Amino acid sequence: MQFRTIIKILGQLVVLFSITMVPPAIVSLIYKDGGGVPFVLAFIFSVIIGLIAYYPNRHEHGDLKAREGFLIVVLFWLVLGAFASLPLIFLQEPNLSLADAVFEAFSGLTTTGATVLTGIEYLPKSVLFYRQQLQWFGGMGIIVLAVAILPMLGVGGMQLYRAEIPGPVKDSKMTPRIADTAKHLWYIYVSLTTACTLAYWAAGMNWFDAICHSFSTVAIGGFSTYDASMGHFDSPLINFICVIFLIIAAVNFTLHYAAVSSRNLRVYIRDPEFKVFLFIQLALVIVCFTVLSSNNIYANGDETLDQALFQAVSISTTAGFATDNFSAWPLFLPILLIFSSFIGGCAGSTGGGMKVVRVFLLYLQGIRELNRLVHPRAIYSIKLGRKALPDKVVEAVWGFFSAYALVFVIIMLALMGTGMDNITAFSATAACLNNLGPGLGDVASHYGAISDGAKWLLTIAMVFGRLEIFTLLVLFTPTFWRG
């Protein structure tokens, strides 16, 4: 293990991350909100620590192997979350504890969207902007951004990319060089953010709210500049714009690249995961609309459709935006929507959860096993579209599912051990492991009332979810350190 090379890279990345403290400081100057000093202090501190890690190891140029790549990704997310919490720790208003600041920072970076804050609209504009910005950088993965820059520093990026990109099939690249791949991902990401900002502004948001909410929408994060989230605007048009961009962001970004480069929208229709994703969204909206209508929850059909469409897409894509308190709906719906977050978005998207393609492959594997019961000697292959998948991919999906279930049960039981009731513990674990945000029970609106121990556990759950279990879990195996 090339620890000095790893420390050098971490130092470079921390210095790079320190630049993200500058925009909130500028926002503070523009709005004269008095909240800029913590960001200046965090910038200086991050630069100094980053240089201390980098400078003594600047001449290290070892080749990265897969093991180093996994370790760098995990360490960077942990280190990054720690440095991201610095401005929140330095803030005098609100005065956050260490657990609260770390929870909020990791929730932003992992695009979970769970918050410990209340009275959000009264916070300094710089703090509001910083929270949204954290989600925007976390959405695509800061590692992918670094992969586009590190080759210029003499560090290869394929191992980082393999560890970071979500989904079961990671070897497919959009362009031959990994740096070009990362740059194309970010071009698409920035373009979507710009389009979302303009759409929100045209629908009635001011520029500050439009920019901030586009950050968390394209990142499928869920942070808002208001306690009432999207419900603050009370606008069906804004809700619809949010839904459209959440669906776009929850689709595999390689499909977006293929559609743009070929100028052909048929690539979406030919993708089996995309079709399953749309089917799931449509089914959830129909179920929510039917149940809400039959219970006369809202005044008319238009409002019912607006609420059903928004909440179904927001929760199932793991964004977690709210227009109403969905936990107060007939209990069948909140539980259904929480379970839908386990599926999440498509592989290669900014969504959380297990990803649509994995759940679809589990379904296909189940069908294959049923067919084998009827015809034990027959040979059945699992096909994704017209492509037969090797058994090792299916085995990896089963392994992921079992690891996901194990981590879920352990964290939920640990939360119940802190004194949390079963509904709150279940929904909080699901919300953080799936990078969703809102839960049920005591965490329906915010996480400020739970114990510090529970916050640390849920922070770990967020990292597990963001790194898709295996990337973090592999570090706990003896084989990893022996190899």
Image (cartoon, rainbow, N blue to C red):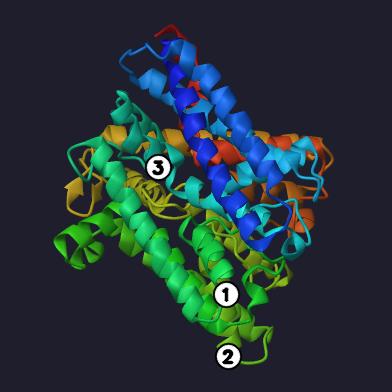
In primary-sequence order, the first of circles 3 and 1 is 3
What whole-number distance in Å separates the C-alpha atoms at marks 2 and 3?
Answer: 38 Å
At label 3, the amino acid type is Pro
SS for callout 3: loop
SS for callout 1: loop
At label 1, the amino acid type is Asn
Residue at 17% across / 53% down in the picture?
A: 386
Q: Which quadrant: the N terminus? A: top left
In primary-sequence order, the first of circles 2 and 3 is 3
Q: Give neighbour class at mark 1: few <14, some 14-19, many 20+ (Cα, 10 Å).
A: few
Discs 3, 1 touching: Cβ within 8 Å: no
Q: Position of residue 72 (x, y in %)?
A: 45, 24
Q: Position of residue 79 (x, y in %)?
A: 57, 29
Res. 166 mark: 3
At label 2, the amino acid type is Gly
Is residue 142 shown left or right of residue 170?
right
Residue at 50% across / 20% down in the picture?
A: 475
What whole-number distance in Å separates the C-alpha atoms at marks 3 and 1?
Answer: 34 Å
For the residue pair 390 and 118, the one nearer the viewer reads as 118
Q: Quadrant of residue 162?
A: top left
Q: Give neighbour class at mark 2: few <14, some 14-19, many 20+ (Cα, 10 Å).
A: few
Q: Position of residue 267 (x, y in %)?
A: 20, 62
List the residue tagged with mark 2.
301
Comparing labels 1 and 2, the label whose residue is closer to the camera: 1
